[in-house]
Amino acid sequence: MALAGEPTPAAAANVLGIAAGGGVNAAHATGASGTAASARGVARVLLYVARAPDETLIAQLKSRGWQVAAARSAHELGRLVKPDLACAGIVDLASFAPRDIGGLETSLRQQQVGWIALATNERLNDPLVRRLVRHYCFDFVKLPVAHATIDYLAGHAFGMVALCDPEVAPPVGESGDEEMVGTCEAMQQLFRTIRKVANTDASVFISGESGTGKELTALAIHERSPRRKAPFTAINCGAIPHHLLQSELFGYERGAFTGANQRKIGRVEAADGGTLFLDEIGDLPLESQASLLRFLQEGKIERLGGRESIPVDVRIISATHVDLDGAMRDGQFRADLFHRLCVLRVDEPPLRTRGKDIEILAYHILHKFKNDNARKIRGFTPSAIEALYNYGWPGNVRELINRVRRAIVMAENKLISADDLDLAGFTEQESMTLTQAREAAEKRAIEAALLRHRHRLTEAAADLNISRVTLYRLMGVHGLRELGGTDDKGALAADEPARG
């Protein structure tokens, strides 16, 4: 599981390189790690990706003992990267057209490769290039540069990667479905939270709208936890009939009911030593809630039809898109179970609050599925980008994936249009006044602040540098009062008339 935007160990050194102004000086701080790796007899493999590889540079690197593997595209590079092989990498960002650079990200985020970026001043002005260099590269140099300098930096990058324990960070999945992509503050906060909660054994509750990627977050927590070598077992509590859920969770003995011809291990027992992810926990029937609570209290289960208490060691991560506070008030969900499940809480940001991430995700999906169309789809038209930002995304990331995949198949040109996305109604609309633009930006800022502070109005108001009363009034203007906390609502409602 990769968290795109999550700094790698090499990224810290890379920040020093950017601060130095040229990138080269930062390498001196690493010592002779590349030389040390060679002294240990480690094969020095180097990946070199450029639209037109420099044969002179390749010859120079080979003469210095590098085993060079060259690639001319993101697709070729993806086939060269091996999850279990530490190596250095050189990526010539200046040689690729801007529309092709995003496709390199999947390979650049591979933590077993120490990347050195080659770029020009003009290319470094591109925000996407700056982000890739900052997050995924050990260092960078500005072209033109001496081949000896590239060799020197590659040696240090290789040495730093070779020092890393491959078990500290799990291999990055090649499938886009196994990656979390995001650069906005809400996603950076999510990545920080994942890293914090992964190192504990406490139960985690993930809240968020449908389609935001709650299972990806659960998997990311598991893969960064001490349990990463044990099973990750997921079960959707809303997709299994209630009368089957009990046996699905806890298993059954032979003869427990008609048709039970042999013993079956349940999902809880199958996850022993690892992590059990209970999706849509709000749909769990009360009978199963009682059994799950008993298991959480005792750490033991009993299969249906059996009398043996079986100890099971699992970490529980649960998620739902429904309002469990309301379900508890209505008697549909046990409060004591909720408090057992929600020791640590993680909030998934909805796509509409993630700003630039919408475009980044769209290109990420495009590069993953672009081969679904015989034509070479190169990107999106300006009107399509406008529509992506104007649309509200009620289905969140899942809906974005579906719309982009459908557009890839249906597009008749090399650029995906708003029509291809079925979002023509969200572009080239009547011109927006400055007042409307300000109101839209104000609403997005309030939504993001409420999300960052888990709907605590006092903290969100301080973040926005306004009073609680002003925040509550603006929430009313923008139809956001249902996002506020109950206590704050009551206090602020009383103050509202005084503000006029």
Image: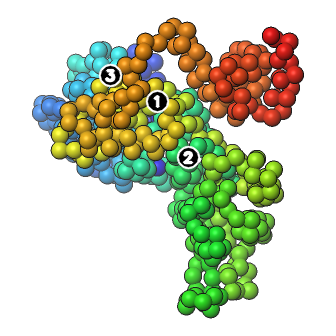
Residue 130: tell me if it is visible: no
Q: Position of residue 420 (x, y in %)?
A: 30, 35
- The residue labelled by disc 2 is 210
Q: CA distance from mark 1 to mark 3?
A: 14 Å
**Is 197 or 295 nearer to us in this picture?**
295
Residue type, mark 2 in image: Ser
Which comes before the other along the chain, label 1 or label 2? 2
SS at mark 1? loop
**Is 277 or 386 nearer to us in this picture?**
386
> From the viewer's perspective, is the residue at label 1 or at label 3 nearer?
1
Q: Position of residue 405 (x, y in %)?
A: 33, 44
**Is 219 or 323 nearer to us in this picture?**
323
- The residue labelled by disc 1 is 391
Specify whether 305 is left or right of 57.
right
- The residue labelled by disc 3 is 382
Q: CA distance from mark 2 to mark 3?
A: 28 Å
- Residue 191 circle label: none
Specify whether 214 is left or right of 371.
right
Report the number of numbered marks.
3
